[in-house]
Image: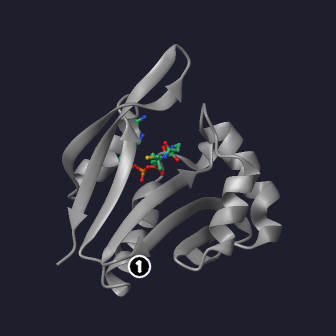
Amino acid sequence: MLGARPMLEADLPTVMAIEEQAYPHPWSRGIFEDCLRVKAYECLVYEDGNDLCAYSVMSWGAGEAHLLNLCVRPERQGQGLGRAVLEQVIQLARDKTASNLFLEVRLSNRAARHLYESAGFNEIGRRFDYYPAHNGREDALVFALPLL
Ligand SMILES: CC(C)(COP(=O)(O)OP(=O)(O)OC[C@H]1O[C@@H](n2cnc3c(N)ncnc32)[C@H](O)[C@@H]1OP(=O)(O)O)[C@@H](O)C(=O)NCCC(=O)NCCS
């Protein structure tokens, strides 16, 4: 059973260790610290017992929500945790009365694209050269889930 709670500064060493394993171009600790400081950001960690196995960062305001980070520890991927976390984020966005939940995903991120599409997100746009990549830059796909 996955329990969600607010991310604390004390979680950042664990969160950063996961972030650096899970992403080729990870966020810095400073980005997480900024997210924790801003009130309109919801930073959550998800625990299976004492095991911090996933986290999410969502911003909200002006009737819209934006999923900025969703990450499952690599050893725990492929066990349904990503889908469980996404369901909790969607519920959180509904609780904030957002009319849409937006996110960006790398074109090459097949697992994430499959997860979002199967959860009902629609591809609504593309940002060219949005992400740094090994050989230059990579496009982002913009997804939206209508919540109303
Ligand atoms: C994307 C991510 C969150 C998915 O989490 P997960 O716990 O592995 O996903 P789940 O086990 O809940 O699986 C969700 C769906 O994705 C599919 N999936 C998982 N890994 C996959 C892969 N490598 N390729 C294709 N599909 C994959 C699963 O089959 C499942 O679909 P199904 O229910 O139709 O079978 C996880 O891989 C991750 O943290 N990746 C690194 C960080 C990242 O890229 N985050 C997204 C940024 S936009």
The kind of residue tagged 1 is: Leu
Name of the residue lying farthest toward the top: 135
Looking at the image, residue 120 sits to the left or right of residue 127; the answer is: left
Quarter of the image that includes the C terminus? bottom left
Quarter of the image that includes the N terminus? bottom right
| Residue 100 x/y as whole percent | 25, 69
Quarter holding ligand 1: top left
| Residue 18 x/y as whole percent | 69, 48
Query: Could you tell me which residue is drawn at 38 percent across and 42 percent down?
Result: 105
148 relative to 136, above or below:
below
- Residue 2 visible at all: no
Q: Quadrant of residue 140?
A: top left
| Residue 62 x/y as whole percent | 34, 77
Looking at the image, residue 96 sits to the left or right of residue 18; the answer is: left
Residue designated by label 1: 92
Q: Nearer the viewer, residue 31 or 81?
A: 31
135 relative to 7, above or below:
above
Name of the residue lying farthest toward the front: 62
The CB of the residue at mark 1 lies under 8 Å from ligand 1? no
Q: Nearer the viewer, residue 78 or 34?
A: 34
Query: Could you tell me which residue is drawn at 37 percent across and 47 percent down?
Result: 104
Query: Could you tell me which residue is drawn at 56 percent across and 18 percent down?
Result: 134
